Amino acid sequence: MKGIVNMFIMLLCVMIGVSACNSQPKTQDKDPVGTFDIVDVDQFEKLVNDTQKVVVLDVRTLSEYEEGHISGAKQIDIKDNNFLDECRKQLPKSKFVAVYCRSGFRSATAAKILASDGYRTANLKEGIVGWTSAGKPVVNGHND
């Protein structure tokens, strides 16, 4: 019986020690820096349609953009060394930024960069590939 009690006490001490090591201070009333929403096509379409509050950003290359983009989207290439500077020039922080690329990977990076700089952002899950697969419209060329 004494062995069982000792084993129980030892197990309890280990659990308390592990719990104490894993605890981290929690921040309250503050979103983590660099967070952004990941939205599906239907949610993204609702954002895109709210032109008073939302700016649509295509972060693909100019040639990709010209092949087909969401109407009204601004184009700033995430691969450009001046990406953030261009965003600061062209995108007001007062508006929500709906970001997309071809498949969602580059735009996730862009959304994180922008969110870290104080923008409120959302990334289109599956990018324009998902958008067109869902039958949503795109326009070609540079002007729309």
Image: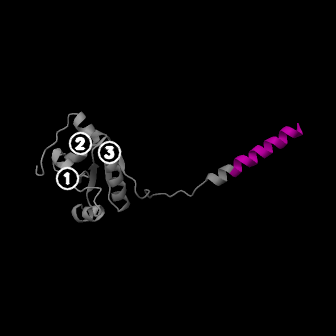
> Of label 1 and label 2, which has the lower sequence position?
2
Relative to 84, 9 lies left or right: right
* Residue type for callout 1: Leu
> Of label 3 and label 1, which has the lower sequence position?
1
How did the renderer colour the structure?
A: one colour
**Dot 2 alpha-carbon crowd within 10 angstroms: few under 14, some 14 to 19, many 20 or more:** some
Q: Position of residue 14 (x, y in %)?
A: 73, 47
Looking at the rendered image, the quarter that the N terminus falls into is top right
Q: Position of residue 46 (x, y in %)?
A: 24, 43
Q: Position of residue 44 (x, y in %)?
A: 27, 43
Task: Give SS at disc 3.
Answer: loop
**Dot 1 alpha-carbon crowd within 10 angstroms: few under 14, some 14 to 19, many 20 or more:** some
Q: Is residue 4 magenta-colored?
A: yes
Q: Nearer the viewer, residue 32 or 28?
A: 32
- Asked if marks 1 and 2 touch (Cβ < 8 Å), the reply is no
Residue that numbered label 1 is attached to:
62
Q: CA distance from mark 3 to mark 1?
A: 17 Å
Q: Looking at the image, is 17 positioned above or below residue 42?
A: below
Task: Give SS at disc 1.
Answer: helix
Q: Nearer the viewer, residue 77 or 11?
A: 77
* Residue type for callout 3: Gly
Q: Which mark is residue 12?
A: none
Residue that numbered label 2 is attached to:
45
**Dot 3 alpha-carbon crowd within 10 angstroms: few under 14, some 14 to 19, many 20 or more:** many
> Of label 2 and label 3, which has the lower sequence position?
2
Q: Which mark is residue 104?
A: 3
Instruction: Determine the residue positioned at 25% across, 55% down.
Output: 77
Q: Which residues are magenta?
A: 1-17
